[in-house]
Image (cartoon, rainbow, N blue to C red):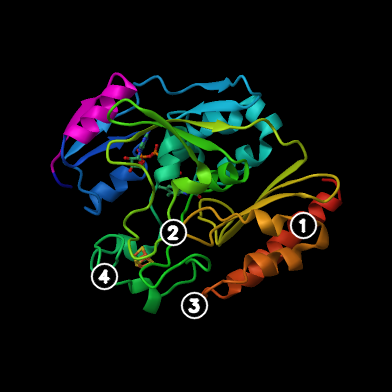
Amino acid sequence: MKPFSYERADTPGEAAAAAARIPGAKFIAGGTNLLDLMKLEIETPLHLIDVNGLGLDRIEATDDGGMRIGALVSNTDLAADSRIRRDYAVLARALLAGASGQLRNKATTAGNLLQRTRCPYFYDTNLPCNKRQPGSGCAAREGVSRQHAVLGSSDACIATHPSDMAIAMRLLDARVETVQPDGQVRHIPMTDLHRLPGDTPHIEHVLAPGELITAVTLPKPLGGQHFYYKVRDRASYAFALVSVAAVLQPDGNGRIALGGVAHKPWREEAAEADLPRGADIVAERLLADARTTAHNAFKLTLVRRTLGAVLAQARAGA
Ligand SMILES: Cc1cc2nc3c(=O)[nH]c(=O)nc-3n(C[C@H](O)[C@H](O)[C@H](O)COP(=O)(O)OP(=O)(O)OC[C@H]3O[C@@H](n4cnc5c(N)ncnc54)[C@H](O)[C@@H]3O)c2cc1C
Ligand code: SF4
């Protein structure tokens, strides 16, 4: 691991200002992703700003009937919150489908959103990767690409975003609240937080240097039945091949978002209008522009069948 300096920030404003002032600085929260990447020297921050003491660990009701989740709320605490379990069950289920109990105890809301891809070639420093080293190439395109993206990918990168929680937050139309180094607060819709890879897969989100996530806000509850189906190679402790988050209403209408298929949570509101017409029609619309490799074409069938299973479960009233 490369040497680095370390400080604990006392306020969000101080943390953001320090991150912008000190070259090579990064925030550290639970450290469950960043420390692994530092040990592999894929991330080499010169300075770490520990944000764990900022008091951003509360889950509060908002005046408009929604919820505000502090950036430092652990995945465990968020999944266990009785209001989240009752009103945003899709979020609690997505959280519990991720990682392991020990990891969820440390993993934070903001860190989970900004965790980096699990593309194996990103972690193998002997092979080219445009995300790790811009311009070096993409080993996954000619390599084993079973886990990789089928939607929104580019010639430069076919990686997926690994977060389960982010899929549910996209479904719920969450907004990310930040403080910038000049103290300004901004609210970013989840749909805009993560970027598609394009020619710059190393730029993964729209946050400015030093911009600190302080909270995620959820609008008022949607009601309906909530589902998070995650298909993976083993029953726990594995990232999604495909996941489907859904909130479905008794009349057959609702929302769906997909995980494991793209560089960001995937939701197309226009396709949701076809939900009462069945899974095949919705899947056909969602996957119309899919681009597969020899290894991951199975994901198209998997999306259709997982969506079919969710809709069947909803009809059965489970
Ligand atoms: C073995 C293993 C299995 C896993 N399985 C799953 C899984 O199935 N599903 C899943 O979703 N996840 C999974 N994870 C990922 C895990 O959920 C993430 O590592 C965790 O959520 C990251 O949160 P953290 O607080 O530890 O982030 P950190 O590692 O501390 O930080 C991650 C990134 O976020 C930035 N950051 C942190 N806080 C802020 C902030 N407030 N503002 C701005 N930037 C910030 C950091 O600078 C860093 O770039 C797994 C991880 C491991 C190690
Ligand atoms: S898919 Fe993206 S992360 Fe994986 S090797 Fe290619 S450029 Fe790197």
Residue named by callout 4: 127
Q: Nearer the viewer, mark 3 or mark 2?
A: 2
| Vertical order, 42 against 148 (above or below) | above
SS for callout 1: helix
Q: Quadrant of the C terminus?
A: top right
Residue 231 locus on image (x, y percent): 61, 59
Q: Secondary structure at mark 3?
A: loop
Residue type at mark 2 is Leu
Marks 2/4: CA–CA distance: 22 Å
Mark sitting on residue 196: 2
**Residue 231 can be seen in this image:** no
Q: Amino acid at mark 4?
A: Leu
| Residue 19 in the image, given as x and y percentages of width and height | 23, 33
- Residue at numbered disc 3: 293
Q: Earlier in the sequence, mark 3 or mark 2?
A: 2
Q: Is residue 241 visible?
A: yes
- Inter-mark Cα distance, 3 to 2: 18 Å
Q: Which region is colored magenta? A: 3-21
